[in-house]
Amino acid sequence: MEEKVLKAIQDDYPDDFAWCYGCGRLNQDGHHFRTGWQGEQTVTIYTPRPEHTALPGFVYGGLIASLVDCHGTGSAALALHRKNGHEPGDGTETPRFVTASLHVDFVKPTPHGVPLRAVGTVQEIHPKKWRVEAEVFAKGNLCARGEVVAVVMPSTFQKKGD
Amino acid sequence: MEEKVLKAIQDDYPDDFAWCYGCGRLNQDGHHFRTGWQGEQTVTIYTPRPEHTALPGFVYGGLIASLVDCHGTGSAALALHRKNGHEPGDGTETPRFVTASLHVDFVKPTPHGVPLRAVGTVQEIHPKKWRVEAEVFAKGNLCARGEVVAVVMPSTFQKKGD
């Protein structure tokens, strides 16, 4: 049976902020990445769709970057939520982060057709800015390393683009 | 009328390497990013699909990262192809690069519903390794800066993942 994150921060994002193509539960066409705690680390598990190939048999790097991206914002939201005394599922509205920067090193070709597991370590830079280091595994093998700097969603996201 | 890249390197990728979800012309479900020369720079133009949102009105960062990724590998292929005396459309098989590392700084929220334009500057590190600096514009505004280090596809991509 496929492993699943039970209590994910994205399940508790406010409705207005749950439309992300990567991790928004209300985006019907999206990936629905879900991120939860695993001890002091964070985890996101996702099995790429058949079309998510770089070439047949290998996962598209942009999909891995997307996974790292939403894993990063989700991990930062988990960490700030916990700092505020809350856990996913406790009925409290969560913080919502956006990505300031994203870095991915592709360590080896990532096999397609199996679940990918992103594991994150979160570090506070300041209360509204967090760094998430991520490792992406397929079948237990490290395939990519990532780093996200995530910031609490600024007010510029509250109005439409200019 | 929407601006279009006329001669794209991806149109000439060998069939076996044209299945990328980002830029493979044979991947029916993919983005079909296409990258060509614009003077000494490279350009990729793409209008995100309706579902490619971060929140309504803004483009998903993972899609921007995907655009930078394939723009990077395409730009590196263009540059090595030109170094070898060739241009897209001249009937010669092209080199094919993969991404070693990807970095994106999200400068400002990217408005949804308009074409994105990635503009690249390519620099040779050595013949099989190139650096591509990219800027992503929407309506003429710089929204993201990216850097890709691309390498000629290694033989580990010729066999299925382990």
Image: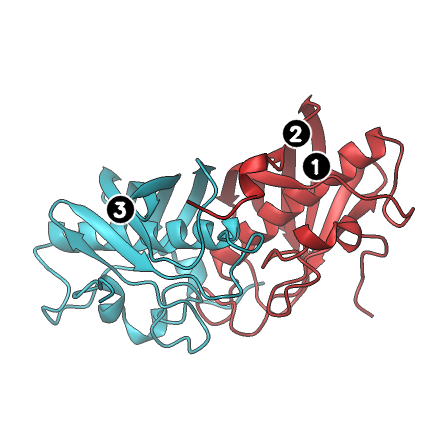
Chain colours: A red, B cyan
Q: How many numbered badges does the structure rendering display?
A: 3
Q: Is residue B152 visible?
A: no
Whether residue B127 is visible:
yes
Tell if the residue under mark 1 belongs to the same chain as the one under mark 2.
yes
Name the element at disc 3. strand
From the image, tell me which residue sits under label 2.
A130
* Residue projecting furthest to the top: A126
What residue appears at the point 77 percent right and 32 percent down from the top-left corner?
Answer: A80
Residue type at the position of mark 3:
Val
> For the N terminus of chain B, which image quadrant?
bottom left
Q: Residues within 10 Å of mark 1 (few under 14, many from 20)?
A: many
Q: Position of residue A69 (x, y in %)?
A: 58, 46
Dot 1 falls on which chain? A
Give yes or no for contact between labels 1 and 2 (Cβ–Cβ under 8 Å). Answer: yes
Which residue lies at the image location 41% right of the left edge and 67% below the top edge? B31
Q: CA distance from mark 3 to mark 1?
A: 31 Å
Q: Amino acid at mark 1?
A: Ala
The image quadrant that residue B8 belongs to is: bottom left
Give coordinates of residue B126: x percent, y percent.
Answer: 25, 39
Mark 3 Cα shell of 10 Å, populated few (<14), some (14-19), many (≥20): many
Q: Nearer the viewer, residue A22 or B11?
A: A22
Q: Is residue B105 left or right of residue A118?
A: left
Secondary structure, mark 2, is strand
Label 3 sits on residue: B119
Disc number placed over residue A76 in the picture, else none: 1
